[in-house]
Image (cartoon, helix red, strand yellow):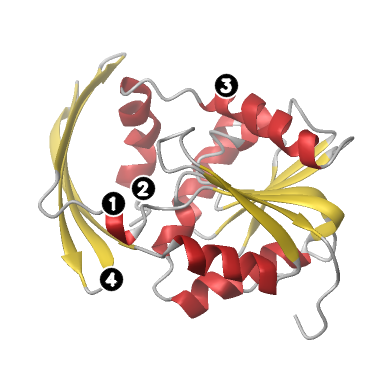
């Protein structure tokens, strides 16, 4: 997971599906400001290659990222010089400041392996919110939405690079185990690599309880941006001991 090989082709594959990170960033900024009027500082947790964070930096006076994977951070800073991207683990981080908006997009929270880890991550994010600030998290699928044996395939072309991606999903405990194989063709030759992704199928109730226990009201908005919906929380109070 999070290899240099993946970082190089990640955006190419999802752009071929029609994913528009800049448009999503505009929608998320508008949503955040409906809940937190005047919001002007943002932290994007698990920001990856900065595909959302880059556009966020044009929409907020301050927009910073948090990313655990060095290949993703390196590529993000290469593409968006001047961004501030902190190295850190969403389960337990302390940046020493607060923001009016904290986001965690594109199902990154699903990579956590247990309810306890997910709750720790939500609490860590909420600690970085100003009172009245907005916490927006895009979940992985809920358990009832899982489809055993699901196969997805993509063929993407950008410039002189062609990428084929095929994935197969199975149930592993209470998680989705995706075996993802890539075939990359470039003028220098053809290469292949495989990624194994394991994403936990947390329930809606588990997410919502994590928000409430972190001192945030919470609503769930089904649908966009990827069909999995969004959890939107507003920081209501300080929670001692968190």
Contact (Cβ within 8 Å) of mark 4 with mark 1: no
Q: Position of residue 219 (x, y in %)?
A: 63, 51
The quarter in which the N terminus is drawn is: bottom left
Q: Quadrant of residue 167?
A: top left
Q: Which residue is mark 2?
A: 4
Q: Sequence-wise, which precedes: disc 3 or disc 1?
A: 3
Name the secondary structure under disc 4.
loop
Please give left or right for residue 134 compared with residue 123 in the image: right
Residue under numbered circle 4: 174
Closest to the observer: 57 or 134? 134
- Would you say 16 lies left or right of 133 here? left
Q: Which mark, by number, is residue 145? A: 1
Q: Tag 3 or tag 4, which sits nearer the N-term?
A: 3
- Assign a secondary structure to mark 1: helix
First in residue order: circle 3 vs circle 2: 2
Q: Residue 23 in the image: x percent, y percent?
A: 57, 21
Q: Is residue 236 above or below residue 79?
A: below
């Amino acid at each position: 997971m999070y290899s240099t090989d993946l970082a190089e082709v990640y955006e190419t594959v999802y752009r071929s599906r029609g994913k528009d990170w800049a448009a999503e960033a505009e929608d998320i900024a508008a949503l955040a400001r409906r809940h937190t009027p005047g919001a002007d500082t943002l932290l994007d947790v698990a920001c990856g290659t900065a595909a959302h964070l880059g556009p966020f930096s044009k929409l907020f006076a301050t927009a910073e990222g948090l990313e655990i994977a060095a290949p993703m951070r390196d590529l993000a800073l290469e593409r968006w010089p001047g961004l501030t991207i902190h190295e850190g683990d969403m389960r337990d981080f302390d940046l020493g400041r607060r923001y009016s908006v904290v986001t965690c997009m594109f199902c990154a929270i699903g990579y956590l392996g247990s309810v306890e880890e997910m709750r720790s991550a939500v609490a860590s994010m909420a600690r970085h919110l100003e009172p009245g600030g907005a916490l927006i998290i895009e979940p992985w699928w809920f358990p009832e939405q899982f489809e055993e044996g699901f196969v997805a395939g993509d063929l993407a072309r950008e410039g002189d690079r062609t990428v084929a991606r095929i994935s197969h999903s199975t149930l592993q405990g209470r998680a989705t185990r995706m075996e993802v194989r890539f075939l990359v063709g470039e003028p220098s030759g053809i290469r292949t690599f495989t990624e194994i992704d394991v994403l936990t199928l947390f329930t809606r109730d588990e997410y919502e309880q994590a928000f409430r226990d972190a001192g945030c009201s919470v609503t769930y908005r089904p649908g966009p941006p990827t069909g999995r919906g969004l959890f939107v929380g507003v920081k209501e109070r300080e929670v001692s001991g968190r």
